[in-house]
Image (tube, grey):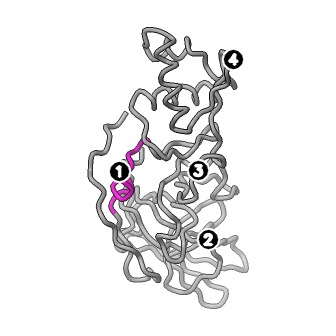
Amino acid sequence: MPHENKTRPIPVRRLFYPITRRMLQLTCVAEYTGYNHRDIISSKTTRPVMTKPLTRRQQEVFDFICETLDTLGYPPTRAEIARALGFRSANAAEEHLRALKRKGVIEMIAGASRGIRIIKRDEAAPTDTLAIVGQVAAGSPILATEHVDRYCPLSPDFFSPRADYLLRVKGVSMQDVGILDGDLLAVHKTQDVHNGQIVVARLGDDVTVKRFERQGNHVRLIAENPDFAPIEVDVTRDALEIEGIGVGVIRGDQGLH
């Protein structure tokens, strides 16, 4: 478990569109929001976006509940939580469950030994969040539930035009415009793109971030790294789909694990 981020919140520069020449470089979102990594959590078992930080022990209890639900299909008892996490008694587990309830991430059903319910994301998530998308499976929508690693407490309206999600960048093909391996690219979903814009493109089974250029039926997806050749696309023959345009970059993924 990573240590809590003790860095004080600091101001972040706003990005003004277009980004064809300069990409916004944010400090990590944990610093921008004043939240730590425990506020942005993975999304199996329809986990909520937390609006209040959890302590280390609370996070361990919450993770164990989610893992039990994922594995067995039902929540653990207090005794099982205590045994798994080394508590002296089920009462200690009960105290942590009550704390999770106060923070709005679970419900407790009275009189039931397994009466724990994770509050679903659509019940708990504030509107000012962005999905962080990791590996995208071939042929499936980018924002499919299985692609969402976690949620980030950052307003979509911080970017212009507004962002619809954050895409985790893999590789160094765009490093010369400041988009590095592990960065989060803020993406505005649109198929209306212009030459010179940075796009998220789906070509066959692959999703890539490149600069867009089109002449007639010929599209070039251009890397910003001399070690990578442009991808040449004939739209009459090749299955090219534009998923959106880049509207900003969050530097690295520190504090988000």
On the rendered image, what quadrant is the C terminus found in? top left
Which residue is pictured at 55% across the width and 55% down the height? 131
Q: Residue 44: x, y in percent? A: 60, 39
Instruction: Looking at the image, tell me whether mark 1 or mark 4 is earlier in sequence order.
Output: 4
Residue 163's tag is none
**Quadrant position of residue 65:** top right
Tell me whether circle 3 and circle 4 mark residues in contact (CB < 8 Å).
no
Residues shaded magenta: 27-38
Tell me whether circle 2 and circle 1 mark residues in contact (CB < 8 Å).
no
Instruction: Looking at the image, tell me whether mark 2 or mark 3 is earlier in sequence order.
Output: 3
The residue tagged 4 is 112
Residue 29 is one of the magenta-drawn residues: yes
Residue 189's tag is 2
Instruction: Looking at the image, tell me whether mark 3 or mark 1 is earlier in sequence order.
Output: 3
Quick check: can you spot residue 226? Answer: no
The residue tagged 1 is 254
